[in-house]
Every structure is written in C-alpha cells, then in structure tokens.
Amino acid sequence: DFRPDDVHDEYQKTADWLRSQTKHRPQVAIICGSGLGMLADALKCQDSFAYSDIPGFPQSTVQGHAGRLVFGELKGKTCVCMQGRFHMYEGHSLCKTTFPVRVFKLLGVKTLIVTNAAGSLADGLQPGDIMIIKDHVNFPGLVGLNPLSGPNDDKFGPRFPAMSDCYNKDLRCLAMEIAKQMGVASLVQEGVYAMVGGPNFESIAEAKLLHQLGVDAVGMSTAPEVVVATHCGLRVFGLSLITNKVVKSYEDSDSVNHEGVLEVGRLRSQTVQQLVTELISRMDINNNSTNNTV
Ligand SMILES: O=P(O)(O)O[C@H]1O[C@H](CO)[C@@H](O)[C@H]1O
Ligand SMILES: Nc1nc2[nH]cnc2c(=O)[nH]1
C-alpha cells in the first residue's frame, strides 16, 4: 500500500546521502534543458555526482542530458544544477521525473530555476530567442497525469495548491532588466509554455490548435517540476530557449529534429548562461513563500 511517510523517507534518504557527500548547502537549484547543460560550467568549487551513483535518482536517457548533479558556488550563492532532466516520455512516472525537486527542498533550496528547449508557436518568437515563462498549460496535468496525484504528502504542501502565481513576478522583472543591461532585450520576451507528452513533435493540426489556444512555446517537460516546486513553496523562475518554429502550415517544408534543438542550445549557450548567472547573483535569496511544512 502507498504510505506517504515511506515516500517522504525516500526523498529524505537521497537528501541525507547528498549532504554526507558534499559540504555545499544549496539555496538555488537549476534544471538544465536540452542542450543547456553548460549552465553548470559557471559553478566554482564543484562537487558532482553521476545520477547512477545517487540513491533513489532516476537515470537520464536523452541525448543532451548528461545525467549529473553538480553542486558549486556562483557569485556568492550556493547552487545545485541538474545536468539532465527526466521526461515523462522516457517512461518515468511523474513522481520520478520530479523526484529531485523535493530532494532540493529537503536540502534547503529556496529558489528553483527551470530551463528548457522549446518550439515557438508565437509569430514574434524566433529560434535563438529566450522566452521568460509567465505561465504554463500543463496538458498532461489537465487530464490527470499529475505528479501530485495520489495521497497528498502534507509535509511538503497542501492537497489543493494554487498555480496562479507559480512563475515569480519579481524574478521575471529582474530577468528582463538584466536582459536590457546585457543589450539582448530584443531576444527576450515573456510568454506561455505548454507541456505536451511527447516524444513526437507536433502534427500540423496540433500546432494550429496550440497556436489558437494562445500557447507561445511548446515542449515536453518543466510543468510537472514547477507544479511540485510550487506545492512545496519553492520560488520558481523559468525560461525557454526557442530552438525551432513549430511547423503550422501544410505549405511549409521545414521539419524539426533533436539535433537541431541541441545546436541552437550550443549557439545561445553563452547568452543563457550570462542571464542565469546574473539573475542568481542579483536575486534576493530570502523567499517569503510560506505554504510549506517540511
Ligand atoms: O524540455 P527539455 O528537456 O529542454 O527538452 C526538449 O527538447 C527535447 C526535444 O528536442 C524534448 O525533451 C523537449 O522537452
Ligand atoms: N513538443 C515540442 N518540444 C520541443 N522541444 C524543442 N522543440 C520542440 C517542439 O517543437 N515541440
């Protein structure tokens, strides 16, 4: 039988193991999207662990996701960075895809930064642009595929958490200000991210539907991590690197592929890294969210 206390123990065991292996006590966690693993390179005094060595951790199976957890210092703040995330389409349960988020909470993390590669539906978003995530549409969640399904673990958060302000407004404003100061404001705008299950990319009819619904960018990750983070009171900042236009016309002969997605990640790696580094450097580390009990 499913017993919440036992499940809580699993997160705690992993957190305890990590604490025994590193002196770093992270305040900020970063999840690297496809092709964005270089975000960890900026960390100083690194301690890194292959996922295969971490008790309870799932394994990364997707190219462009190294499968390593890296701890280190960044501009006076202690960070932990997932070089490789877990996706539902890899066959992981949603509980497993979001497992690290609760481990981060137990490690003392207050702020989660999620990044991803995404295809754009909005006409104003071009490959290479950065979309600051203002909100999401969690398609799997809408039909009941939700990491919070099952008995609620009150130690982490409430049964019915609000999702109306899950992407922190202050951090969004700060990121925009930083983009202006970096001289890259023309590449950065806010938008709505939608998560679909994948692993196939969108059909044209699906792309048209998403566009009509007001979705700006689409990918196969992020929303479950943000739901779990918000449930346990973490402050969240999210960004999508736009790696391709989603084909939404039968006349268009373009076609998306994962290699192309990774290539745009490489091309924009420096800008994304600089933006995230500056954001971490300038963010107020004290998070006022209170809906957590861990
Ligand atoms: O969301 P991330 O992990 O950045 O990866 C995105 O890129 C992959 C497809 O190229 C999919 O996994 C999609 O979700
Ligand atoms: N679903 C989806 N995921 C992506 N990840 C990167 N590009 C895309 C895309 O066009 N569609």
Image (cartoon, helix red, strand yellow):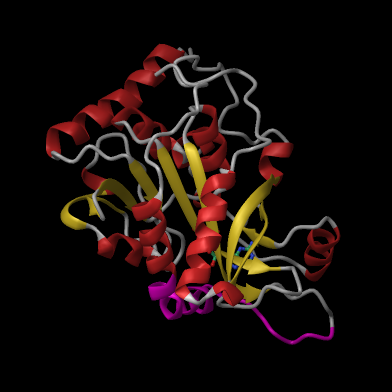
Position of the C terminus, as image quadrant, is top left
Residue 113 placement, left or right of 68: right
Total residue callouts: 0
Q: Where is residue 230 in the image (x, y as percent from the top left)?
A: 54, 33
Q: Position of residue 138 (x, y in %)?
A: 67, 44
Where on the image, by quarter, is ligand 2?
bottom right
Q: Is 202 or 184 nearer to us in this picture?
A: 184
The secondary structure that dominates the magenta segment is helix
Q: In this view, does 253 lie above or below 78?
A: below
Quarter-wise, where is residue 277 in the image? bottom left
Q: Is 69 or 168 nearer to us in this picture?
A: 168
Which residue appears at 21% of the width and 36% of the height? 18
Q: Is 52 or 177 nearer to us in this picture?
A: 177
Quarter-wise, where is residue 272 in the image? bottom left
Residue 131 placement, left or right of 37: right
Q: In the rendered image, is residue 251 in sight?
A: yes
Q: Does the magenta stretch include residue 256?
A: yes
Which residue appears at 45% of the width and 76% of the height? 268
Residue 232 placement, left or right of 100: right
Where are the magenta residues, as a range? Answer: 251-271
Q: Where is residue 11 in the image (x, y as percent from the top left)?
A: 34, 27
Q: Where is residue 35 in the image (x, y as percent from the top left)?
A: 42, 68
